[in-house]
Amino acid sequence: MDKIVECVPNFSEGRRARVVDEIVNAMKLRGVKILDREMDANHHRSVITLAGDPGAVEEAVFRGIATAARVIDLDAHCGEHPRIGATDVVPFVPIRGMTMDACVAIAQRLGARVARELDLPVYLYERAATRPERRDLASIRRGEYETLQREIATNPEREPDFGPKKIGKAGAVVIGARPFLIAYNVNLATSDVQIAKDIARVVRERGGGLPGVKALGFELKDRGIVQVSMNLTDFNVTGILKAFETVRAEAAQRGVAVLESEIVGLVPLEALTQLAARALQLPGLNVSQVVEMKLFGE
Amino acid sequence: MDKIVECVPNFSEGRRARVVDEIVNAMKLRGVKILDREMDANHHRSVITLAGDPGAVEEAVFRGIATAARVIDLDAHCGEHPRIGATDVVPFVPIRGMTMDACVAIAQRLGARVARELDLPVYLYERAATRPERRDLASIRRGEYETLQREIATNPEREPDFGPKKIGKAGAVVIGARPFLIAYNVNLATSDVQIAKDIARVVRERGGGLPGVKALGFELKDRGIVQVSMNLTDFNVTGILKAFETVRAEAAQRGVAVLESEIVGLVPLEALTQLAARALQLPGLNVSQVVEMKLFGE
């Protein structure tokens, strides 16, 4: 498999396991692997991670959206997490052999099909956005399902990219493309949480720091230490090693040592070969040189 | 597939492609992937790399040995590369979820079976060796097939680990286990080859340097630069980053900068997660956190 796309659809059902089963089962196709499945009862929301052949993943996600539209009723839905649809948000993520543009094309094609075959309003977001303000999911989801119901027909700002200017009990679907997000934490040998907060402020993009990096400072009370917790939203722009080195340098300036770092959840192989490239002045390492890729990935 | 073993059998046929085809085809079993196939006419030798499920690889290699014994006649074999058998040497290499001891056990079991079912003398080498001098392949292969023919029955030093103290036209087979070998080069911004040779002498194990590292200094004439060319014979003992950092520090002491480094051929994913662990003070990274492993490797 030379091309791999990941998709992380969020469905507005986090309590009835059989409903989530039905949606997940609809997405089980040849060429698709379900990597993860998280249900949250408080949020009343499920997050499914699937990946595989781009065409198969696109088809699988369409079937998931169709199933969710049939089995979820937003008029009866109430949870902590904001939402506008039974299938609330559908990001496509390039993993290997895929450009961002190819993922944007999938989002556009799937969006058009969801509108045409399921008669649902579709908004394109992040890298697939057609208006600058729609890059931000929160702005599309403003006021949630209940507000969108009132505004979709009359407010031009809320006109969907595809589908009807009206909304039923399945709500609307937000589809888009974004880079892989790496959750990366660096733990510091101090109990002074202000140091972690200060470093987070310096390293994050919003504070003029590293592009593509979100960061917060936390206290890890049980260990008596602090953590700079980062989201690397595009490791091709700022990779893991660059983030680590920057935090380490900022900590050193404040007389604090790094205890260790950790990657939470998954990391694409390309992020590791990119790390090797930087650490070893080794520009030429290719994922196809990894034994396991020779074995499984081709 | 949670356990992966690699095997790199060397066969004494490097000219007739159809003969090599027959051997390779005999090794094509479910659970086994042929990763590479190299024929060398001057050496009159083929090197096949296969990997996969340990049991399947063991069975495949047995079939390869049986086929080679049938189709290769060492009495009619003449090439540059030293050899004592139709199947000359068979190293098993742990790739994932396998200890070295598990690979030694495969070598022992396969050796006993080759002796029993094919009536061939078998020598165990490297980590599977039963005598210290047999860790070294060259000592087992001393004088090659022609000398072994004369000595096997009478010289106790040449008594095989398994099988008859006599040798037919298929010769003897050397079977063993060793760690994965990473071929790793660091290129230096100087045309003075003596600097590369000096650094190689300092970093290699034989010179009291890094354990598990073999190193030579070369000139890359067409580029006007020099190279420290290393074999990392056990990346769990000395990893890629340690080797790089040591060469870079030695070069810096001599006023020379590193231009870049390169991995030649394959590298196991564990060598990259180990590199990340060292570069990022990240002890907890597991190969199962790599997206591609979630997709293919489980």
Image (cartoon, coloured by chain):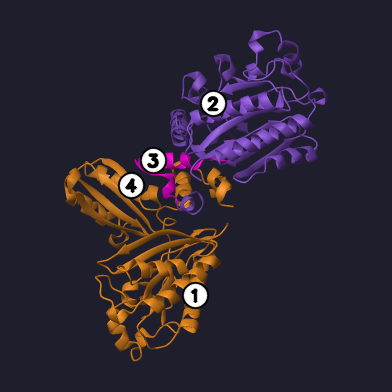
Chain colours: A orange, B purple
Q: Let me know if residue B277 is in the magenta part.
A: yes
Whichever of labels 4 and 1 marks the residue nearer the N terminus, that label is: 1
Residue type for callout 1: Leu
Using the image, name the chain to which the residue with label 3 belongs.
B
As displayed, is residue B46 above or below residue A287? above
Residue A84 vertical placement versus A254 (above, below)? below
- In the rendered image, the residue lying farthest to the right is B76
Residue at the spot of label 4 = A262
Residue bearing mark 1: A110
- Where disc 2 sits, the SS reads strand
Which element is circle 4 on? strand
Q: CA distance from mark 2 to mark 4?
A: 32 Å
Q: Kindly identify the amino acid type of the residue bearing the numbered disc 3.
A: Ala
Say if mark 1 contacts mark 3, CB within 8 Å.
no
Separation of residues labelled 3 and 4 (CA atoms): 9 Å
> Which residue, given by chain and number where applicable, does mark 2 sit on?
B214
**Quarter of image, res B84:** top right
- The crowd level at tag 3 (other Cα within 10 Å; few <14, some 14-19, many 20+) is some
- Note whether B131 is above or below A204 in the view shown: above
Identify the residue at image location x=60%, y=30%.
Answer: B91
Rendering coords of residue A17 (x, y %): 34, 66
Gap between marks 2 and 3, in whole Å?
23 Å
Image position, residue A34 (x, y; %) = 45, 60
Residue B42 appears anywhere in the view = no
Are discs 1 and 3 both within one chain? no
Q: Chain of mark 1?
A: A
Q: Disc 4 and disc 1: Cα gap in Å?
A: 35 Å
Residue shown at the point (32%, 60%) measured from the top left: A205
